[in-house]
Amino acid sequence: MSGAELGGVAWWWWPLGLFALSFAFGVVAVIGGVGGGVLFVPLVSGFFPFHIDFVRGAGLMLALSGSLAATPSLLRGGLASLRLALPLALVGSVGSIAGALLGFALPADVVQTALGATILGIVVLMWLGSKADRPRVGRPDRIAAALRLHGLYHDPATKEDVDWRVHRTPLALLAFAGIGLLAGMFGLGAGWANVPVLNLLMGAPLKLSVGTSAFLLTVIDTSAAWIYLHRGAILPMLVAPTVIGVMLGARIGARLLRVAPSGVVRRVVIAILFVSGLRALLKGLGIWV
Amino acid sequence: MGLEQGPEQSVYARWLDIGARLGFAALAATFLVYVLGLVEPHVPREQLPALWTLSLAEYRARTGAPAGWGWLGWVGRGDYLALAAIALVCLTTLVCYARVAFFFFRRRERAQGWLAVAQIGVLLAAMFAFAGASHAAEQKEVPDWFTDTFLDVREDVAEARKGGKRVAYYFWLDGCPYCRRMVEDTFSDPRIKARLLRDFLPVAINVRGDREVTAADGKAMPEKDFTRAHAVRGTPTVLFFDESGAVVRRVVGHVPPGEFERILDQVRPSGDNRPNPSRR
């Protein structure tokens, strides 16, 4: 469908449709254990008439809003660590600014192709799905020791106090520069990358990794969001219904979490990601326009 | 309840909670104002479906949307009022970091304090330094003095002929470094600008664009197909059309001002004996 054909539809259908779609993303994303942004950007840029510049802007705001809403309670509950996030967020936000600038400097089809390749990479990462509840950590590295990157949190599920520490901080800093770059360039929330780096590379417990990842998104995505905003890539008519839809959907998703078959939903999410990643790749290459 | 989490974490959580709630409430309220048309937007809502299919550069060229902090002066319009609420959401992190940096220094945790200060610096750079840079870079994709027409070759040629001019179609690509050089180096030369405005109707065509162009034979097609139909294989390319709508000269690649001026001399409208301002 071309933009011209769809241009005949009354304007108010679009925010309404985006709201409905984002609401569904919100529900599915929570149950499937992914961020809404990673679903939103490839799917909407692949199958809707909006230019990818505006979709990336909306995706970034969506990821940012979701993490802003979730982070206060995660911080209060000790499931996100400010201390651990400080150095990683700094490097990640420099990367995200660079990514945002790069995304605007590159031709749209190159960005679309790279987005497709990245999404397919995420599909592989999700399919393999390796994670460790409480990884073993040897001696903390110098940076981790100097910045006191350790702590204790109470896990209400197991009713245990969990002592945590991390290692391989220099490698993680490097990884976060790359994650920031991708987040800024494509407007994706980067939970899919944050969590494995925190959990598998640094050795943070899984729950702390998920919580700290949400905190990191508030900082990394904010940095890139200013570039998008000043460039004019944030269209309130696309952003507002998307943000409101996802946040309401996520509330429903959180309630359904106990009863929904999360394994099935996760497989559906992976399938959706695969199709939308493939679509983005083929669209970018000019094979399926 | 968290254990061994410094009190700075609770402070951060409290400020973030308040900031995020304020931001989202402002976003919902201003969006309602915008979508209900209570405050007139800059871009009419019904025109948006035809505009958001365009690239950012084209959208900005069509709507005259400001870049950098220019939007602040437009918050009296519905769409920019909602954008201001989005900016408020984006401000939350900066405020929280400022609060927590103060907290770290007061507790003599200098390393954390400096990390927070560095983060504030990065956020401020994103807000101010790069806002200006990106604006300057984007403005140079197409000079703002190029003519915005309905992209109908027959109409453009007739319009140019009426003013004793010829049509110059400039084929460009978003992000193409040679196009940028063409704009920065050649089109920004005051003599070239004066010559192009006096003797030609300069019109920009995005080689990957989707705007509809009507060719000389009356056939309508997107910009990208029009580009292919005229065998434009590289950017930048300038095609000069004569008074009958035929291409009389093709200029490929970045051409320095002196050479481009000589080309303009060769292709300017015949019978034109107005003095050349650059040769005075």
Image: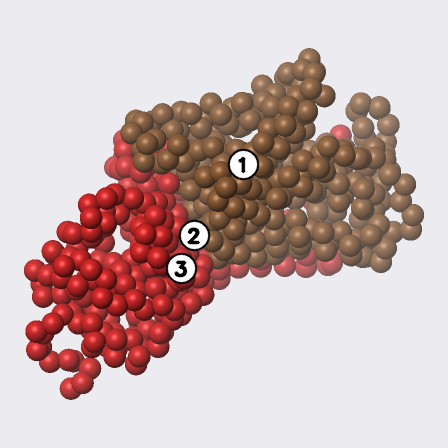
Q: Quadrant of residue B250?
A: bottom left
Which quarter of the image is occupied by the C terminus of chain A?
Answer: top left
Q: Residue visible at 19% across and 45% down?
A: B218
Q: What type is the residue that disc 1 sits on? A: Arg
Q: CA distance from mark 3 to mark 2?
A: 32 Å
Q: Decide if residue A244 is in sight here.
A: yes
- Which chain does tag 2 point to? A
Q: Are marks 1 and 3 in contact (CB under 8 Å)?
A: no
Q: Earlier in the sequence, mark 2 or mark 1?
A: 2
Q: Position of residue B94 (x, y in %)?
A: 56, 49
Q: Residue visible at 9% across and 77% down?
A: B274
Q: What type is the residue that disc 3 sits on? A: Arg
Q: CA distance from mark 1 to mark 3?
A: 26 Å
Q: Taking B140 as reference, is A136 left or right?
A: right
- Which chain does tag 3 point to? B
Q: Taking A104 as reference, is A34 left or right?
A: right
Q: Taking B104 as reference, is A22 left or right?
A: left
Q: Quadrant of residue B115?
A: bottom right
* Residue at disc 3, secondary structure: loop
Chain identifier of the brown chain = A
To which residue does mark 3 refer? B233
Q: Position of residue A283 (x, y in %)?
A: 50, 41
